[in-house]
Image (cartoon, rainbow, N blue to C red):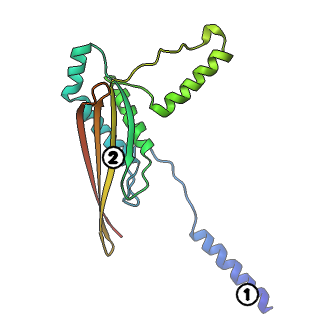
Amino acid sequence: MKTIAKLFCIASFFTVFSACNKHTVTRVSPDQQIDLSGRWNDTDSRLVAEEMVKDAINRQWRNDFVNKTNKKPVMIVGMITNKSHEHIEAETFIKNMEREFINTSTIRIVQNAEFREKMRQERADQQEFASPDTQKKWGKELGADYMMFGTINSIVDAVNKKQVTYYQVNLELADLETNEIVWVGEKQIKKYVTN
């Protein structure tokens, strides 16, 4: 009898415990700012991309190029290296940058080296397997005028249950023909976290 009572108590405990730890999921807008840990997040990536693209397209280099060539600059958003203390997915930031540039309708973006290779493989397959009237021709790729590259760095200062994290994103835009750097951008984010 004691054993049955003990089993009943254990079962009741787990029932109450599992009810208290109910897992919930709520869908929110992708644009909604939610900071949980204080680490770099999707909002940082999006806001930094928006501000840096806005700064880049409003500088003199673009006017000089348009006045000289009478066409939109073609750009590759190249390697952006994460040198911060956190795991930051640089590809997400690169895609944010590409989207912002394209949405301004003032810059044309071409694929980076990795994707260009994949597209060339697809084009090579088409030469063998696609009908001749739908094959995409070689030598029609859009050559880039500029390449953007940069780094994401961070500095952390912490004591007891307080922490300040400083992020600095540095980007540079270089002329692919002359290697001249035509624009340098910098954006900082500072976060104060208490636990």
At 38% from the left and 53% from the top, the residue drawn is: 40
Residues packed near mark 1 inside 10 Å, few (<14), some (14 to 19) or many (20 plus) = few
Front position in the image: 156 or 173 = 173
Give the quarter of the figure containing the N terminus. bottom right
What kind of residue is marked 1? Lys
Q: Residue at x 28, y 30 (%)?
A: 179
Q: Quadrant of residue 98?
A: top left
- Which of the 4 image quadrants contains residue 38? bottom left
Question: On the image, numbered disc 2 is attached to which residue?
Answer: 151
Q: Residue 173: image x %, image y %?
A: 28, 33
- Residue type beneath disc 2: Thr
- Report the residue at 33% width, 34% height from top: 148
Residue 33 horizontal/vertical position (percent) = 37, 49
Circle nearer the N terminus (1, 2): 1
Q: Residue furthest left?
A: 60
C-alpha gap between disc 1 and disc 2 = 61 Å
Q: Nearer the viewer, residue 63 or 178?
A: 178
Mark 1 — residue?
A: 6
